Image (tube, rainbow, N blue to C red):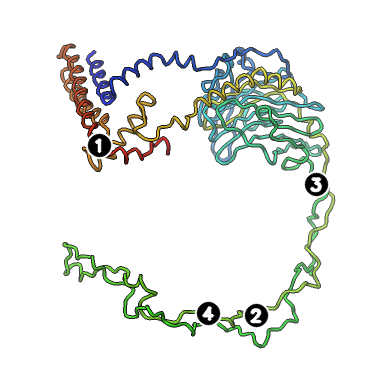
Amino acid sequence: MRFNVAAAAASAAFLAGVSAEEQKVLQDESSSVAESATKAAPELPTFTPTNLKAPFLEQFTDDWEKRWKPSHAKKEATGDEEWAYVGEWAVEEPTVYKGMEGDKGLVIKNAAAHHAISAKFPKKIDPKGKTLVVQYEVKLQNGLECGGAYMKLLRDTKALHQDEFSNTTPYVIMFGPDKCGHTNKVHFIFNHKNPKTGEYEEKHLSSPPTAKIVKTTELYTLIVHPNNTYVIEQDGESVKEGSLLEDFSPAVNPPAEIDDPKDTKPEDWVDEARIPDPEAKKPEDWDEDAPYEIVDEEATQPEDWLVDEPLVIPDPEAEKPEDWDDEEDGDWIAPTVANPKCAEVSGCGPWTQPMKKNPDYKGKWSAPYIENPAYKGVWAPRKIKNPDYYEDKTPANFEPIGAIGFEIWTMQNNILFDNIYIGHSVEDAKKLAEETFFKKNPIEMALEEADRPKEDDKPKGPNDLKFLDDPKLYIMEKLDLFLTIAKKDPFEAVKFVPEVAGGLAALFVTALALIFGLIGLGTAPAPAAKKVAVDVKEKAKEVKSKAASAAASGAEAVKEGATKRTTRSQS
């Protein structure tokens, strides 16, 4: 109990530099924070599971664990390193800019960890001859500095086991945002099967769109049509369109012809387009030894040139140090400085004629170049038919898909995935977005906007700060201002920032009270401890009163200079 009384005394000391009126308002406002927040918060729509049907549609309802299983595999890595998928997953509502009541999503719970989780489809999805639509929501609740938030659509194979899902598990499509450092893009990668060899090769979108790194929900949509065209959308707006046959690297189809690896350039092949003219001769009057510059014989010494004045002189203001010992340190010589007389004239010291460019200078002679009559052009090996050539006219006929997975390493946690649609209907994907994303996103945007500091609300200087607006910033800025002024004049610091002076004095008294309180612990009765708190409070008021009186006489004298100092929050 005595510890509680001492703590109360310490709190009183900390607030001694703040007016009683501000303390009372702080208490009143803190009691009504919940009520004010409730009034200011917009009314949220309530999540209702969709009635739409699709080959795979996930809204992370209560039965989500029946479908999703975390991986316990080891991640294959180069060298001797071995990584395990230790990252944890949870299904929960967002904690940042919540836009819909009861809307839960799949959340990455660990920062700087490898995560892997997957869900098998009720039956495989075969995109052959159909439009493929992939859509999902991403919410970067802590932003994204380095990590991925993309999904993988896994190839349907007998070896597809959720417990063993890893970075080596074969996938059909990888789609979604990825950022680390200057790299920031929306991946679209598909694995293409070589019809001649049966081998798979990743095809990367050459110029992917940029991901939006925001804390509000973002909607990513990929549409691939049977005619090999694709569309990538963000928040329902198209950001990239093109063709699978034209926009990916390496290209889907190899070239029909290649260079003949056995062909070599003939020894007599001439590939110099221009050569020095063999008939050109150096002119007789060409002097290769003529210098680039010569003395300007026409130059004359300026009238104000001080020939007898040195460029530097001993510093007339320099004095021999008192501790200089000629026997140990040698003869003391004053340091030199620029001769001030030379600054007012054209120059000092011996004058010499300057150099100028030699009009007869021509340099080393070389023959001019002419077109080479023997030139045959740039040599290139002859073309032959590519033995590995094939033409796949329908790369949009992806391999059957058996599952969806998130296999991610990220430095930020609380990345949330929700409302996943994988199917063949563009219209149904839009309807799902209208039921979910387009209802909550405007609310999230409004919450984000309200959370941004307004330029007009930012304090211009320490004197514009209010304790109730930001107690921590108020204390830090006032203390910093006090210390800055105190370095030059402690008395002016007390006069201009009396809150800090009063607070520091009260803290000193509080420290003494705590020491005596601890010494008397176990022997002093509870009334004595209460008396300490009362005495501290009275002492704080006394110090505050004296500091306020001093402020009345000295504040104006230093106010003009101090208000020019901007707060750290504006820098």
Amino acid type at circle 1 is Ala
Q: Earlier in the sequence, mark 4 or mark 3?
A: 3
Q: Percent x, y for residue 496? A: 26, 34
* Marks 2/3: CA–CA distance: 50 Å
> Does dot 2 land on a helix, a strand or a loop?
loop
Q: Earlier in the sequence, mark 2 or mark 4?
A: 4
Amino acid type at circle 4 is Glu
Q: Earlier in the sequence, mark 2 or mark 3?
A: 3
Q: Percent x, y for residue 244? A: 76, 37
Q: Quadrant of residue 75?
A: top right
Q: Quadrant of residue 435?
A: top right
Q: List the residue tagged with mark 2.
A: 365
Q: Earlier in the sequence, mark 3 or mark 1?
A: 3
> Does dot 4 land on a helix, a strand or a loop?
strand
Question: At 82% across and 37% down in the image, what residue appears?
Answer: 392
Q: List the residue tagged with mark 4.
A: 293
Q: Are marks 1 and 4 in contact (CB under 8 Å)?
A: no
Amino acid type at circle 3 is Pro
Label 2 or label 3, whichever lies nearer to me, is 2
401, 553: nearer the viewer: 553
Question: At 59% across and 81% down in the image, what residue appears?
Answer: 361
Q: Is residue 478 left or right of residue 199?
A: left
Q: Percent x, y for residue 441? A: 60, 23
Q: Which mark is residue 255?
A: 3
> Does dot 3 land on a helix, a strand or a loop?
loop
Judge whether residue 156 can be spotted in this image: no
In the rendered view, tell whether residue 306 sits above or below residue 509: below
Amino acid type at circle 2 is Trp
* Marks 2/4: CA–CA distance: 18 Å
Label 4 or label 3, whichever lies nearer to me, is 4
